[in-house]
Amino acid sequence: MEKRVRFQSTWLPWLLIAPQMAIVLVFFFWPAGQALWQSVLQQDAFGTSTEFVGLENFERLFHDATYLASFQTTVVFSGLVAGTSMSVALLLAVMANRIGRGSSIYKTLLIWPYAVAPVVAGVLWLMLFASPWGVVAFVLQQLGWDWNHLLNGHHAMALIVMAAAWKQISYNFLFFLAGLQSIPTSLLEAAAIDGAGPWRRFWTITFPLLSPTTFFLLVMNVIYAFFDTFGTIDAATHGGPGKETSILVYKVYYDGFKALDMGGSAAQSVVLMVIVIALTVVQFRFIERKVQYG
Amino acid sequence: MMVERRPWLDALAHVLLIAGVLVIALPVYLALVASTQSAEQIATSHPLSLLPGQHALDTYRLALWGGKTSSGSTIPAGWPMLWVSLVMALLIATGKIVISLLSAFAIVYFRFPLRGLVFWMIFITLMLPVEVRIGPTYEVIASLGLLNSYAGLTVPLIASATATFLFRQFFLTLPEELMEAARMDGAGPMRFFVDMLLPLSRTSMAALFVIQFIYGWNQYLWPLMVTTSEDLYPIVLGIKRGIFGEVYVEWNVIMATAILAMLPPALVVILMQKWFVKGLVDTEK
């Protein structure tokens, strides 16, 4: 709803938005424009000459097996993180909602990992699986499972998935709990009177009614796994073994700052921007729809 | 609340929740345990003892003030890094709140040309987290001579579409009479902003502060790129340095540093839980 009456001033509003606009222009639009521009340029190895190459960087990118592998790694990683963290959070939220009174204590005890930095999460889980004294690695060894995330790519992936999902449970839990609490009890009671047990009620009433929350969280979790887990991976696996846990954000950093391929790195940045914009649009359109149709 | 009672299901709920709480707390508990042992104890244990050791004081002294360990590695002092993190988190959180309040005020309470364009330009920044534009943003900071400075560390992270939207939404819900009354009393726009809007926005500001403080405190990739001087390393950067920098990994000190790094934001979440939950829900909707 827009305001009917407003203040009149030709210069004051500009002054008020100046700080934000300055930052937005200098640190968002300028770099984003630079990324677009550099992504169509190619510098020679000595950085002495630059030439316009059109979409060549992108072509190179999408024919690059390591880039495609990184894409695949990212998709697998975010799918696993979202799946693990959301299902654990949903289970805990359903249980907390069932208890009703007293659930606030559990809430307090479950939400603090949100405050833990991704890199700290990576270090903590690395410790659990450190060889030979890590507690979880030891238990696995006793069960006859030789854990080695330094050599085994699947183990390394499992490690970062656990670290990243662990941190995200608190976030998902809060949103699922809020979603569950907004479901009218009368609906569930009516179903109970009709003889539907808790299991049946959950799948036929609660879960469908939660679908807006679930969808929202799915997008948020994918964004989280794509962009906020750099620290976790850098601490836990360094993208290794080989490049097996090197997700897209890790690769942009590595190619741009360690391998100094600016054109390629800029093209990767552009691809990432397209991905975020797509995800945000999906999210935004969805929220709009929800607002309109209740 | 339900028409039926299933005591065994309630019991199961408690069991699962307690299991969840324990599993989630496990890594932090073990980090605490590890931080109370000596590095040799940890390296030779198989597995790590589940009970605290005797070396808590030594470890935390090393983590906070630095020094030489018995194996000869040099540990950098942690408290200057904690200070950097604190300054960075406070600058980012306050900066975001201030510039967003101002721009939301302009967008809601004034009519000016290009208002739609301005709004759209702020909105689109929502889609460009620093992680996707690291290279070019780094170059901008470098060409402005802001590497290794608090300005370089914080200013690019201060622009925030979420905060602007939050305040915009909030201002739009305020009754029209508020401004009419202010005008009747002859109050100018800035007077109205300071005397009316700011006091009313206190709850939103607190909620936003909690979220943005955590965001600022936990920044990792950006400081990793713009700081080369160790005086400007935030604490989260200090942790990883210990794992890959040294020949001999001093796990006890790393774990102590990890505990120190997570304590301030965790306390903020727990002590300001009400605002934290509000901030989380408001900024995402």
Image (cartoon, rainbow, N blue to C red):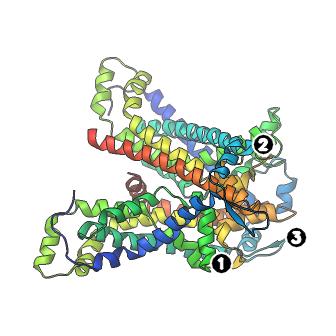
Residue plotted at (81% across, 65% down): B245
For label 3, the residue is: B70
Q: Chain of mark 2?
A: A
The answer to whether dots 2 and 3 both sit on one chain is: no
For label 1, the residue is: B148
Q: Residues within 10 Å of mark 2 (few under 14, many from 20)?
A: many
Give the vertical position of B196 relative to A101 (above or below).
Answer: below
Residue plotted at (35% across, 60% down): B166
Q: Chain of mark 1?
A: B
Which label sits on residue A99?
Answer: none
Q: What secondary structure is found at the residue carrying circle 3?
A: loop
Q: Residues within 10 Å of mark 3 (few under 14, many from 20)?
A: few
Residue at the extreme top:
A195
The answer to whether dots 2 and 1 both sit on one chain is: no
Toward the viewer: A49 or B60?
A49
Across and down, in percent, residue B24 comes to 60, 47
Across and down, in percent, residue B284 comes to 41, 52
In the rendered image, the quadrant that contains the N terminus of chain B is top left
Q: What secondary structure is found at the residue carrying circle 1?
A: loop
Toward the viewer: B223 or A173?
B223
Q: Amino acid at mark 2?
A: Ala
